[in-house]
Amino acid sequence: MSHRAFILTTLMLACLLALGAQVAIDFSTANLASASLVVASSLAVLLYLQWTPALHTHPLSAFALLGFCVTTQMGALLGQTLYGASLAAHLRQPIETFATLAFFQAVALVAHLLYRWVVHPVGEHLADREPSLPRQLLQRLGLYEVPTTSTLWFMGYVGLMAFVLGAGRESTFGKVMQGLSFLTWAPFLIPMYLLQWGERYGQARRLYPHLVFFAGLVVLLGLAANARGIMLSGFVTIGLFALLNALRSERPVQARQVFRLLGWGAVLAALAVPVSELATAMVVARKDRGYISAPQMVRETFRHLSDPAALQAERERVRKEALGKYDEFYFANPLLARLVETKFHDNALYYAGTLSQSDKAQLADTSIDLLWATLPDPVLKALKVNVDKRDLDFSMGDYLAHLSQGGPLGSRRTGSMFAQGWALMGVGSVAFYFVACLVMFSVLDLLTARSWSGAASLSAVAMLAVWKVFQYGMAAESLSSWLSLVVRTLPQNAVLFLLMLFIARATAVVLGRQRRAMADETPALN
């Protein structure tokens, strides 16, 4: 059995076992119907990836489909079952939510089939076809080349400095720094290239100690800034890329690899509790963010981490919020709550279903403003668009709850592009999403390097974006945030990466010339 077949079959069996467990956990109609919907939807995606070459020909977009399934449905089923909780518990309308997510996932699957077969087919029989102009340009600029370890270290430290300088700044300088901060994770590509190329890429014994030091530095700065995302991203990116690499492997699985996987699973399970406690401690310490220094923030975080009563009080606060007008409580584990978006879609779909016609008119006006706000300020000024981003400092989850129940804006509650789209366009949102999927697949495909025979491999930019694509590529917080990912974030990341690549290479050339000049001037020793 190949690696791909082993992983996909294991996930299918896990879903079926979880369905059986849910029958024992909660025999209610809502829970059984929800679990059945999730299993059917998950099996559809897993079988599609098993029976088609999508992971080989269009790896990034196929992985985005798997991410849609995991972060909205399969992850909820497996996570809740693991904790012995009902899948339908804490959801306002579980059947409607899972049915909606399954339906739009089916639309994405059909769109992916069309894209692979009609829009952008690949294979040796199409080897003579001329690459598109954007692909030719990106190839000449070096996007598809494998960066050296020194280049990735250079980018990583640039990203780290950008994160420090841009944190909390709303100025143009701050925005530029925040745009560069994604490069913080560049050194974490080194293990990915080692997985692909082995010792031909570099000596692991020399690289890994430096990577451990760099990872510790990132964690320390994440604690100082109370930013969980910057701490998790590198590790999650490595894990997701390793998963994608295994899903694309047709090599047979060996027994020692299974035992090694079980060993890593045991290690991760052991780390899950302390990491979860650390995440909770950071939430407790967040109230002081912006009011105390970075060293004080680190000390406060570890003080709360060593205070079980404070951590339990935070958990109780989250649970009590579930009894109020708005809540985001679904998982007992805060890390699962960050990775799986089911509860957010449930909230947004519920609130969108309560909107009146006048509410929907306000939603339409605000949605247009949010779409304009995805553009940089200089572009808005050049187009003479009268949109002030400061007036739009809220999320779609905020706005849907505000329209429905009059809640405050600015809490950054996570929404759902499906709820927003259905409230605005009704059935027309299905056609819109179908076209949007084709656009997303095209953009993701441009980040994938291809050989003359059509064989695909991920560019460095695609590897850096693998978590964002996995979690938000097919299902985002709002239509505007999804559009921003497609037309701004991913292209901007490619441009900034190429800029840093040029600077790194130019620096290496200058330093190389200086070293040669110094060597020429140094007298030989007799």
Image (tube, rainbow, N blue to C red):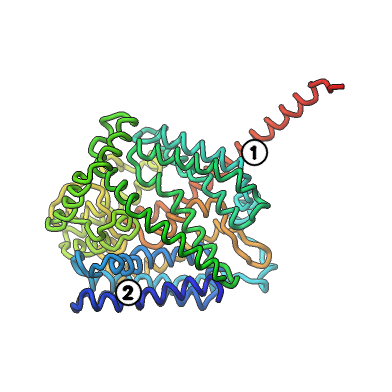
Can residue 118 be seen here? The reply is no
Pick the quarter of the image with the N terminus.
bottom right
Could you say which quadrant of the image residue 500 lies in?
top right
In this rendered view, identify the residue nearer to me: 67 or 389: 67
Helix, strand or loop for disc 2 = helix
Q: Earlier in the sequence, mark 2 or mark 1?
A: 2
Q: With 125 as the anchor, is 238 left or right in this view?
A: left
Of the residues tagged 2 and 1, which is closer to the observer?
Answer: 2
Instruction: Answer few, some or many: residues within 10 Å of disc 1's Cα (few below 14, many 20 plus, some between 14 and 19).
Output: some
Measured as percent of width and height from the top left, residue 4 is found at 52, 71
In the image, residue 232 sits, relative to residue 359, either above or below, namely above
Pick the quarter of the image with the C terminus.
top right
In this rendered view, identify the residue nearer to me: 336 or 408: 336
* Tag 2 residue: 18
In the image, residue 442 sits, relative to residue 381, either above or below, namely below
* Tag 1 residue: 505
Give the residue at x 64% y 51%.
145
Q: With 131 as the anchor, is 64 left or right in this view?
A: left
Measured as percent of width and height from the top left, residue 325 is found at 13, 56
In this rendered view, identify the residue nearer to me: 261 or 69: 261
Distance from disc 2 to disc 1, alpha carbons, whole Å, reads 51 Å
Measured as percent of width and height from the top left, residue 74 is found at 35, 69
